[in-house]
Image (tube, rainbow, N blue to C red):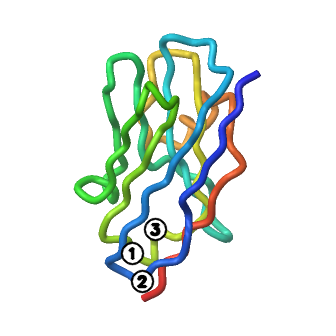
Amino acid sequence: QVQLVESGGGSVQAGGSLRLSCAASGVPYRSYCMGWFRQAPGKEREGVAAFSAPAGTTDYIDSAKGRFTISRDNARNTLYLQMNNLQPEDAGIYYCAIASDRPCLTIRFSDTLRQYTHWGQGTQVTVSS
């Protein structure tokens, strides 16, 4: 059974950094997409960044480019999201998810969420101005 557990959220001031982690277990796929999504109060869940395995291809929404980095440690079965220069608009609950269906859809499209079949419980990110 696939399980995803996020950690690393917290409260920071604008300009600060956080690194989110997503520990994966029970993943039976060799080829898959893993992504980070976020949901702010009153807003729809949106994609932030995606990682395509085994190639290691990454994809970001425009607002994350140059500030966020998605990566995966295969030995630890963990997906990371390094977030630098955080802004108040980055706040929300961050979820990681996995999809075995390929290819990985472009992360900025709202329909991309439907590709992902397993989700973690989320971790809260708060950014104060």
* Residue 71 rendering spot, x and y as whole percentages: 37, 38
Instruction: Give the residue number, with chain letter if any, for mark 1.
Output: 87
Q: What's under tag 1, amino acid-wise?
A: Gln
Q: How far apart are the two marked residues, 3 and 1, measured between alpha carbons?
A: 5 Å
Compared to 9, does 98 lie above or below?
above
| Residues marked 3 and 1 touching at CB (< 8 Å) | yes
Instruction: Give the residue number, with chain letter if any, for mark 2.
Output: 13
| Residues marked 2 and 1 touching at CB (< 8 Å) | no
* Residue 38 rendering spot, x and y as whole percentages: 56, 56
For marks 2 and 1, the one nearer the N-term is 2
The residue at the far front in this view is 75
The residue at the far right in this view is 1
Mark 2 surroundings: few (<14), some (14-19) or many (≥20) residues within 10 A: some
With 61 as the anchor, is 97 left or right in this view? Answer: right
Instruction: Give the residue number, with chain letter if any, for mark 3.
Output: 90
User: Which one is in front in this view, the residue at disc 2 or the one at disc 1?
Assistant: 2
Compared to 85, does 94 lie above or below?
above
* Residue 43 rendering spot, x and y as whole percentages: 63, 64
Compared to 13, does 70 lie above or below?
above
Secondary-structure class at tag 2:
strand
* Residue 64 rendering spot, x and y as whole percentages: 33, 56
Residue at the location (66% across, 70% down)?
A: 41
Residue at the location (48% across, 38% down)?
A: 79
Q: What's under tag 3, amino acid-wise?
A: Asp
Q: Quadrant of the C terminus?
A: bottom left
Residue at the location (56% across, 43% down)?
A: 22
With 32 as the anchor, is 129 left or right in this view? Answer: left
Mark 3 surroundings: few (<14), some (14-19) or many (≥20) residues within 10 A: many
Secondary-structure class at tag 1:
loop
| Residues marked 3 and 2 touching at CB (< 8 Å) | no
